[in-house]
Amino acid sequence: MYTNVEGVKETKVKNKDTEIGGFIQVTNKGAFVARARVIYILGTKVIEKQSPDIPVLQSAFFAIPDNATKVTFNVDVALFFGTWATIYWGTFEDVPSICYELYGTTFFARCLEVPCGSNDNNPNPVPPVIIPPYNYCCPYRYCCNHCCNSEVNNPYSYYYNYF
C-alpha cells in the first residue's frame, strides 16, 4: 500500500519527464472481483487506464500526471462471468491524490473514499455496516418483517418461509 504521497508524486512516468501530480488507489476488501478505470485528458490526447481484475485483498494503483485534466474514475464489480456492473463513478477537475476501499458482497458492493494509509495498523478493518430498517413496510402499510406481524395480520405472509 502506498502511504508516502510525496514519494509517489516524485516518481517519473515511463520514459517521460512528466511528474506525477496525483494518484488513485483502490483496495478490494469485499467478497467479489472488481476492476477500476481512470480516464483523463493529457494535452490533446484522451488517456484510458484500466486495472486487471482486482480479487479480494488486492489493490490497483493509478499514477496521474500533473498536467492531466478532467479525470474520471469508475469501479465495476463482476456479477457473473463477463457481466460487470458499475458501482462508483466520479469526476475530478483537479488531479486527485485519493484512496478508495471496496467492501460488501457481489450484489451489495460499495466504494468508500478513505484516508490514504488509514489501515496500516489494522489488518482487519471494519467497513461501515448498512442494515435495512427493521420496520421496513410493504405497500398498503403492512409490515413485511414476519417477526413483527403474525400471519393473520399480514396478507403478504405467504411470501415468507417460516421456520
Image (cartoon, grey):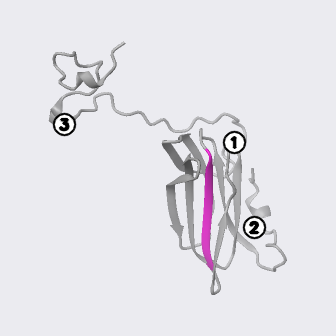
- Between disc 2 and disc 1, the foreground one is 1
- The numbered mark at residue 41 is none
Q: CA distance from mark 2 to mark 1?
A: 24 Å
Residue 96 seen: no
Q: Secondary structure at mark 3?
A: helix
Question: On the image, numbered disc 2 is attached to which residue?
Answer: 9
Q: Residue furthest top?
A: 163
- The numbered mark at residue 57 is 1
Residue range of the region highlighted in magenta in the rendering:
33-41
Residue 17 seen: yes
- The numbered mark at residue 139 is 3
Residue 107 is covered by the magenta coloring: no
Q: Position of residue 106 (x, y in %)?
A: 53, 42
Magenta span dominant secondary structure: strand
- Mark 1 is on which residue type? Leu
Q: Residue furthest bottom?
A: 44
